[in-house]
Structures are given as structure tokens and as C-alpha cells.
Amino acid sequence: MKRINSMKRILSGIFAAAFVLSASAAQAQDKPPLKIGGILDMSSLYADITGPGSETAAKMAVEDFGGEVLGRKIQVLAADHLNKADLSANIARDMLDNQGVEMIYDVAASATALAAGEIAKARNKIVIFNGPGSIRLTNEACGPYTVHYVFDTFGQANVTGLAAVKSGLDSWFFLTADYAFGQDLEKDTSNVVIETGGKVLGNVRHPLNTSDFSSFLLQAQASKAKVIGLANAGGDTVNAIKQAAEFGITKGGQKISPLLAFVTDIDSIGLETAQGLLLAEAFYWDLNDDTRAFSKRFTERMKRPPTSAQAGVYSSVTHYLKAVKAAGTTDSAAVMKLMKETPINDFFAKNGKIREDGRMLHDMYLFEVKKPSESKGRWDDYKLLATVPGNEAFQSLEQSRCPLVKK
């Protein structure tokens, strides 16, 4: 009899424990998922730079984090803004108001980023910019929950322009994409050129995503500037460089300087045409063992290495999720406080730090594109010329026009 009663107690204990576990599991399932939303160029001139690769990088970060935080499953959303600022704003509004998104990532292109950023700011939600470059995002358009993570026009201009002028390339003409990013990139590079003792001989603006650069390149050629600075990105940069080669501009002695180029652009152009180009990047897949390890995993999914923007997506999403876990909440103020207090140490950045204006400080790199004879194979495109510390590459807080910066 005693044995029967003992068995009953043991079984009761097992059933009670099972009930508690199942109740806990049910409670976890009842919690809504933590949603993060990417607003991306999935199909146009910036699709290779961000697009499906940025969505993949965000999903990789979530998987590596364990797929959930605070008992909530993590969902990665993505939408195509078609390079339209009004559509980007509408997507951001829908994500935050109707879909329950807690954080927006990437937002490729500057005009679309500025539009989505205003929506996030009005709702006190965190937005992390990986693909856009306009310095306005950490100047006039900065917000308490805004992070500019990968690069900006000031950093690109400072690293590339400074090196070029110091090497004797001291007269410039700009081909500029006629929107926020291109205008800021031209302005910031012009300032660097002039302050370093160079001259700006002129500029011409071109429509976004144009296919014919002939008239713009002929104006640049006629200027006789030593450098034709390309204040554009993605497909516009690729097409401008290819057409400059067709017109014999580089053989005539003028240098083409892409002020924002990615490894995917160089691959599209080809080393025969791109060799010798100087460019600034925040990341390169073949920098060290850590970058190679991440890039190998990314390449297995995307069949090519990540761009700096896509690597930045993985890093920033991971940094966000760590802060959510440490804060025990998704409240923007609590999460951002920890994001700014916690150094970033991963394959993307060493001792990275998010400043009060939202700029994430990290090293930038000056590369020269290899000659075909120097390359060991596809994607082996860059020679590292210099590493520029973040506090030298990016705009100082003293120069900032962000209203959050105390002076």
C-alpha cells in the first residue's frame, strides 16, 4: 500500500511539472513576435548593395542569436521601397502602426531613409541606417533613436578625397546623382578637396538611375580636371565607369574616382576597367579571419560575398538584439541607452561606439582596385592602402549640426 501511495506521489509530481512546463510554453507562444522591418531596394540600382542580401544578413543575425528574445520569437520583415521617398514613408508608417514592428533596419538610399526616419522619429522607434549615406541623417535629421551604422558622405569624402589630393590629384569635376545623397557627397568631397589645397572646376547633375552618361562625361572631359568624382552609387556608378572607359577618358589621363563603391560594383565593372581606382569602404570580405568566416557563410546563401551595408545589417541587428535582452524590454529609450553604452566588437567593427548624434564610429579603409594580374580569382578585388580610425574618418561632434549634441 505504501508503495502504491509513493508511486502516486511521484506520478503527481511528474504531471505537475509537466503542467508547469506546458503552461510556460503556452505563455511564451502567447507572446507576440518581436518584429524588425527592412525597407530595401529589392529590384533596382541598389539591390546588389542592400536588397535581398540585407534581408538575408538580418535573418542570419536572428538565427545566430537563437531566434527569440524575452520569450518572443523574432521575425524579420522586408519591403521594397522602389527608390520612392513617399513609398518608403508609407511602408515605415504601416510597419510601425499596423504590423507591430519594433525596429527598422537598413533603408537603402538617402531620400528614402530621410523619409522613413521622420516616421520612426515621430513614433519614438529605433531606426538603424546601413545602406544610405547622407550626412543629414546624423546632422539635421538626427533623432534620439536613430543610428547611422556603416558609412556616410563625410567619411567617404574624407577618406577618398584626402588621399587623392595628397597624391597630386588636386583638380576635380563632379558627376552627381541629383538627390540628397549625391548632393551631400559632392558637397562634402568639395570641402575636403578645397581645404586640402585642391580646386573644384565644376559639376553636372544627372537623374537617378540613368542609362546614358555620355553628355555628362563629355562635360567632365572638357573640364580637363585631373579627377572626375562620381557622387553617385550602385548602378549609376557602374554605368558611369564603364562608359568613361568606352569614351577613352581614363586613357586620356583623367582619373575616375567613385566616391561610394562596393565590391559588387567592382565585380560588375570588371578589373580590366576598374583597376587602379581608389575607394573607401567600411568593410571588405577578405580583411581578416573574422571577415572571411562571416563572408563564407553569407556566400553559401547568396552566392557572393557581402557588401559593407549587408555586413553592417548583421552587426547592427545583433547589437540591437543584445541590448533588448540586456534591457529586458523593447522600450526604445532603454534599448538605445544600452546600445550607446556598449562597445561593438565583432567581424564588422572593433571597439565601435554609437555617439550621441547616432553616428557609429568605426575604422574606415582606403583600398586600391587590383590589376587583373594581381587577383587570385573572382571577388579578390582590393589592396588595402590605409586604415583610418573612426574619429579621423567621420565628422567630429564639434562640426555636428545635430540638435541632440550639447556644445
Image: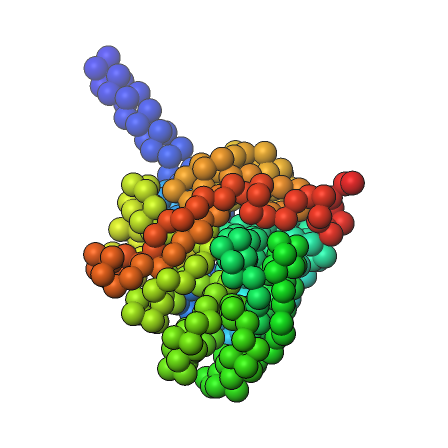
Question: Can you tell which quarter of the image residue 86 is in?
Answer: bottom right
Q: How is the image coloured?
A: rainbow
Q: 41 left or right of 187?
A: left
Question: Can you tell which quarter of the image residue 192 is in?
Answer: bottom right
Quadrant containing the N terminus is top left
Q: Is residue 401 above or below residue 47?
A: above
Location of residue 399 in the rendering, given as x and y in whole percent from the top left corner: 71, 48
Q: Residue at x 29, y 62 (%)?
A: 371
Location of residue 235 in the rendering, given as x and y in whole percent from the top left corner: 44, 74
Q: 219 left or right of 262?
A: right
Q: Is residue 84 above or below residue 150?
A: below
Toward the right, the furthest residue is 407
Does any portion of residue 121 appear in the rendered image? no
Judging depth in this view, the residue of 220 and 233 nearest the camera is 220
Q: Residue at x 40, y 33 (%)?
A: 20
Does any portion of residue 187 appear in the rendered image? yes
Location of residue 215 in the rendering, given as x and y in whole percent from the top left corner: 52, 87
Q: Residue at x 41, y 39 (%)?
A: 346
Quadrant containing the C terminus is top right
